Amino acid sequence: MFEFTKKRRVADEVKEIIPQPVIDGIWQTLKKMKADKLVVSPVVAFVFSDDYTEDTIYVMGLQNSGAVAKEYDIAYKGEKKFLGQGTIIVIKDKPKTMSMSISELNKQSKE
């Protein structure tokens, strides 16, 4: 599950909202979760915290409807206007790819 030799796909909707260094940080966080043997599901959600420092943001990695959760920090010094929006990033493990997209919950809340 979540083999980093697979292709990684990032949906355009993610690229429009989330800066590339943060996207890279989420991939690195998932890699750390896998190395720490914390990945138990083929779907992992990342929720952004509203708290941040000048050079760090925080995300909560969630699996199994929140039954497995852990906070992680991502080094990031850029603009943080994407925080405080309730954005949830979902990474799904598929047979040949890992795909990153915006949660369906976020899409529904905009309707």
Image: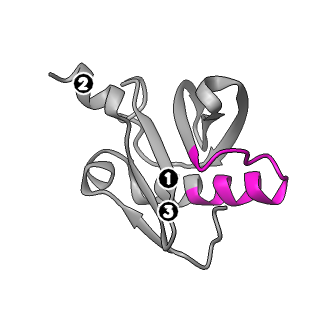
Are dots 2 and 3 in contact, CB under 8 Å? no
Q: Secondary structure at mark 1?
A: strand
Residue 34 lies in the magenta stretch: yes
Q: Residues within 10 Å of mark 3 (few under 14, many from 20)?
A: some
x and y percentages locating residue 97 in the rendered image = 47, 69
Residue 65 lies in the magenta stretch: no
Q: Amino acid at mark 1?
A: Lys
Q: Is residue 82 above or below residue 24?
A: above
As measured in the structure, the alpha-carbon distance from the residue carrying label 3 to the one carrying label 1 is 6 Å
Are dots 3 and 1 in contact, CB under 8 Å? yes
Q: Which residue is mark 2?
A: 108
x and y percentages locating residue 6 in the rendered image = 55, 76
Of badges 2 and 3, nearer the viewer stands: 3
Disc assigned to residue 94: 3
The residue under the point 55% across, 49% down is: 76
The residue at the far bottom in this view is 5
As measured in the structure, the alpha-carbon distance from the residue carrying label 2 to the one carrying label 3 is 24 Å
Q: Is residue 74 above or below residue 104?
A: below
Position of residue 42 in the picture relative to residue 70 (left or right): left
Position of residue 67 in the picture relative to residue 37 (left or right): left
Q: Secondary structure at mark 3?
A: loop
x and y percentages locating residue 56 in the rendered image = 62, 41
- Residue toward you, 107 or 51: 107
Q: Amino acid at mark 2?
A: Gln
Position of residue 26 in the picture relative to residue 106 (left or right): right
Q: Amino acid at mark 3?
A: Lys
As measured in the structure, the alpha-carbon distance from the residue carrying label 2 to the one carrying label 1 is 19 Å
Mark 2 or mark 1, earlier in chain: 1
The residue under the point 73% across, 45% down is: 40
Q: Which residue is mark 1?
A: 92
